[in-house]
Amino acid sequence: MARDQNHLPLEIQQTALLQLLTNSLVLSRTAPYLSCYDVLNLAATSRAFRYLIYQTPQVFRRLDLGNVKTAQFDVDAIDHGGETWRNVQVDENLTEDDFYSGPLRGIFYNLKRFDILRDVQVLTLDGLSVTAELIHDILIDPAFSVRILSIRDVKNLNNRKLRQALQYACRDSRPEGTPRLQGLYVFGPKEPTPGALIKEQSMSPSPTSPAAVAAAWNSKSQKALTASLAEEPEAWYERRGKQFPHRIDQEWASTLVACDGIIAFDAVLCTGPRHLNSPAWGKVNIEALNAAAASPASASIPHFQVATHSLGGCAGCGSAPEGWTTWGEDGHSRDRDTRRSSNIGKFPLLAPPPVHSSTLGAAMCPSGQSVRPHHPFANKAEKKKARFVPRCFDCIRDRYCTGCNQWWCETCYAGAGANSGPDQAHVIKSCWECGMNCKECIDTTQRMCKRCGGGYCLIHNEGSDLVACDWCVGRSRRFRELY
């Protein structure tokens, strides 16, 4: 029977693990799944491991600081109306940016001191305290080599200053080769992580031997695999409907236009025929559509708008006036003068950020597709194309079912204000909580009470059943309790 590795001499354990990780392929494929905490613990075991970790660029190519204890910032504001600070001494010369970005700037200083910062190409700062000035430094400071940055659900971020920094970095008079940043995750939610991860790392004893570190890696990799298998369908290409939990400011549209071809985002511009960037611009009678629309908000049409919904083909004609956004059909054309790529701005970045690569192709590629769609042999064996129709809410208003995500294009439109009348409308509002629903969804969720004759919703009228509404059910229950 094989002897347990934990009972082997420490020198043999170190030699075996060191020989395994000396293989650059093994190390590069393993390091992205480890936290900084585990990597630094391994480097502290011996001089040989320290040299291997700090002298191999692939180890810190992907850096996730979201679970690092020293990067956390739990203070909400600097001044609470004269509240006395006990644990934090605020210098009168300390700026707001220095205060809120202090933990991350301290980490970046140490990484730069150990000559590690230049190796970081995929940086994740989700949920941390991040300021616009810190993002500006990442964009212009030559000490950073970040190509893909994730700042989802961060704190203390001034979005107006962030948009200004992005537009300044992508200006036409920018220096050659800048900005190095090519992809920015900012709109979507961060990936859910176990809440007790930081507490577990801070309270549990640190592994001191390579065998213990390897056992911890194996356990965490199993947890990561289980979590990845339980993830929801992929955004944009598989998950239809609303893509972002929060509202996106209108000013972000002009930022995406300014960064088009230079920096990609986890969102794209709406391609509806109401906007200037649409391939169907001028091909649809927008004035007639506005006259038939039930909502007066359709009369105000911005030139550009960020897409918030991923749609399939129109329920009437099966397509859209602007066509599909299909991965793999267009080549990676590039303008040599402006260094603009046609794919940067057309396809969204897909969460989570890539693990084993720092290229935009890996960050944009849908699951099951080729990373290089322009390759002559790519996608030949694929039967189903990865495609979607990006639209903003104003471009599907009164023509979109929130229940089943069906929608009707401008050509197939029939609304409550159309010439066909309300009885022929594709979607109507029968429940305030459900919103606009199609007839199939209404037949599934809406009922007529057999006792009072009123209409009710099975989803939002708690206490109702298939026969009576919640009021009648509750009234009969109270009547029975009296006797």
Image: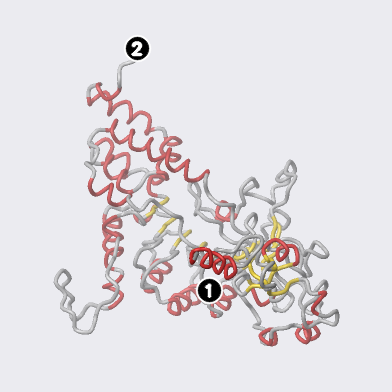
For image coordinates 27% across by 29% down, the residue present is 14
**Type of amino acid under label 2:** Met
Tell which of 222 and 273 is nearer to you. Answer: 222
Residue 394: % across, % down? 66, 77
* On screen, residue 134 above or below 194: below
State the scheme by which the image is colored: secondary structure
At horizontal 35% and vertical 56% (from top left) the residue drawn is: 117
Kindly give the residue lying farthest to the top in the view shown. 1
Q: Which mark is residue 370?
A: none
Q: Residue furthest right?
A: 420
Q: Quadrant of the N terminus?
A: top left
Q: Residue furthest front?
A: 483
Is residue 271 visible in the rendered structure shown here?
yes
What residue is shown with label 1? 247
Q: Quick check: 3 left or right of 461?
A: left
Q: In the image, is residue 262 above or below residue 167?
A: above
Residue 264 appears in the figure: no
Residue 107 drawn at (x, y percent): 28, 59
Q: Is residue 283 above or below residue 387?
A: below
SS label for mark 2: loop
In the image, is 127 to the left or to the right of 71?
right
- Residue at label 2? 1
Callout 1: 10 Å neighbours few (<14), some, many (20+)?
A: few
Q: Is residue 206 above or below residue 22?
A: below
Q: Earlier in the sequence, mark 2 or mark 1?
A: 2
Dot 1: what SS?
Answer: loop
* Residue type at the position of mark 1: Arg
Q: Nearer the viewer, mark 2 or mark 1?
A: 1
User: Around disc 2, counting alpha carbons within 10 Å, would you say few (fewer than 14), some (14 to 19), or many (20 or more)?
Assistant: few
Q: Is residue 262 left or right of residue 429?
A: left
